Image: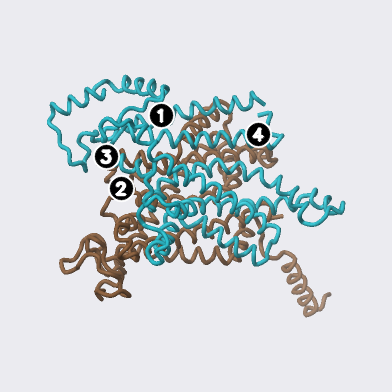
Amino acid sequence: MIGFILRRVLAAIPVLWIVITVTFGLMHAAPGGPWNALNSRKLLDPALEAAFNHQYGLDKPLYVQYLNYLGNVIHFNFGTSFEQQGTGAAALIMQGFPYSAAIGIVAFIFAVAAGVPLGILAAVKQNSWIDHTSLFGATAGYAIPSFVIGIFLLVIFGVDLGWVSILWNGSWTNYVLPSIVLGLGPAAFMARLTRATMLEEMHHEYVRTARAKGLRGTVVIVRHVVRNAMIPVVTVMGPTIAALVTGTIIIEEVFNVPGMGHLYITSIDARDYPVIMATTLLYAFFIILGNMLVDITYGLIDPRIKTT
Amino acid sequence: MAVVGQATTRDRDVTTLAGELRGKPRGLWSDAWRRLRHNRAATAGVIYIVLICLLAVVAPLIAPDNPNYASPTAQSNTPPIWSAGHDTRYLLGTDELARDELSRLIYGTRVSMAVGIVPIAIITVVGLLVGLTAGWAGGWIDNVLMRLVDAVYAFPAFLFFIVLATVLRDTGFGRLLGGLVMLFTAFAIVGWTDMSRLVRSQVLSVKQREYIEAARAIGAPTWRIVMKHVLPNSLAPVIVAIAFGVPSYILAEASLSFLGLGVQASVPSWGSMVFDGFPAILGQPAFVIMPSLLIALIMLAFTFLGDGVRDALDPQAMQ
């Protein structure tokens, strides 16, 4: 058991390393450094540019910069932002992180709490109107991109009805739409998947046996069937977490949330390397962490997997 | 000494009876095709997709105006025809650079279709090559290829698109075809991994079947076994992957363009039209709604089609 968990944790480290290396390589392959970003207003005197480069260590050979960066990352030092002099990249991210985290967590809870029961209900009442409407709703929620749904809802509730503000004013109403819209796609996906796995389980022999034994009603069957049907659903939570994490980038742009995603986009525009790298790493870290936790959970709930 | 008439009648009966017994040819693909045709949502999806493809092809003939240049007499941000202050020359209004909205929406079909089809084509070819090789050869070739797949797969796809788009946007390469070549490359680099894994697992299971052993026993060369037996029998999940892959890349391009990171500024893509129209959302939400609606519809169409294809090819349903 401990060995299994340890193996999963260790397997995540090379993945993180790949992300760090690729991001570093790509960042430094980009044309236009932070001092002459092509859409920037700043045009520096060459001597000044050389001084800045020296100060930030940008004139050292690439592999030296890479090793320095690697060493810093291990010590959780992500450097200072180029754009906002003197502020650490990590500090900037931490400003925006709470908003993104709040929306992401609520979205995840919504996705599971709305998607799974809906899928179970649809499977149990197969081919009823409940099934058909929820299936259609789930397909629509899954197929239509989140920013499209977000924009529709923003226009309806923000522009036409005026119930929520377009701009961020810190009240709890600002969190409602982004969380729901972010969680809607995963919720729809979970509903569809849960329904499919439930249907598959319900056709298995043990269900017939349980019914023949006289076990009472749908409730008990649901308790048996649901447990087994949940296994594929748990495996899909890894990609769901990944989708939620990267989805916040888009949702924050739609709803003007002052979170990490918005910081990410502005730092990309400004070629603010330290912030770009730090944010990319943080996103990748959460995705990898999510996958790892899901892997471990899957190993815990399915006794057949523990041996791998 | 059969009576001719009687014999003929009997012959006809026998032929007809045998014909009925024989029936129409049935096999894996015709069964699947029949199931797909009966799926109404999937059929509706196909019709819509074909319409959009046609629109993409004949766009220059249908679009009333040039999507990239504003006519000197046009005003920017003219509202569409159902709002006050509209201009009858521009049915759906003009955007913030005074370009005709309707024409841009029509030309947007080209970008969406291109982004849907080209990466998938590349990914399918590469995925089949890698998957067939890894699955059939096994051994160290399989190991090396799968390690490579794992390494590429490790990087979260959307983050990779963003980082790559950021890096390449301002280079010459990034400007080819208005940024489309860069998008094709990014999608292809990320997408071949899934396809390879899919093909490889199919090949591994097909490899065990008896007809492969039989083919080997009669001395068929490897390439013929792979091409004539392994490949066709591995295609079902590939087709489903294609059906679901196309909308995922349309979505990726729309999302990236919405963030300002996809196609170059001048290219009329629905995603970038949402990006352009977003600042005016309070005053004129129509400019944001229209391209969003088109994105939603094409995604729905492909999802219905993908569902239909998957249900049609589902081995369980075939029993």
> Could you classify mark 4 by the number of other residues whose Cα lies within 10 Å: few (under 14), some (14-19), or many (20 or more)?
many
Q: Colour of chain A?
A: cyan
Q: Quadrant of residue B307?
A: bottom right
Q: For the residue marked with disc 4, what is the amino acid?
A: Gly
For mark 3, name the chain: A
Q: Which mark is residue B179?
A: 2
Mark-to-mark CA distance, 1 and 4: 28 Å
Which of pointers 1 and 4 lies earlier in the amino acid sequence? 1
Q: What subunit carries mark 4? A: A
Q: Separation of disc 4 and disc 3 at Cα? A: 43 Å
Spatial CA span between label 4 and label 2? 43 Å
Which residue lies under the disc numbered 1? A20
Label 2 crowd bin: few (<14), some (14–19), many (20+), radius 10 Å: many
The tag earlier along the polypeptide, 4 or 3, is 3
User: Marks 4 and 2: CB-CB under 8 Å?
Assistant: no
Mark 2 vs mark 3: same chain?
no
Mark 3 lies on residue: A270
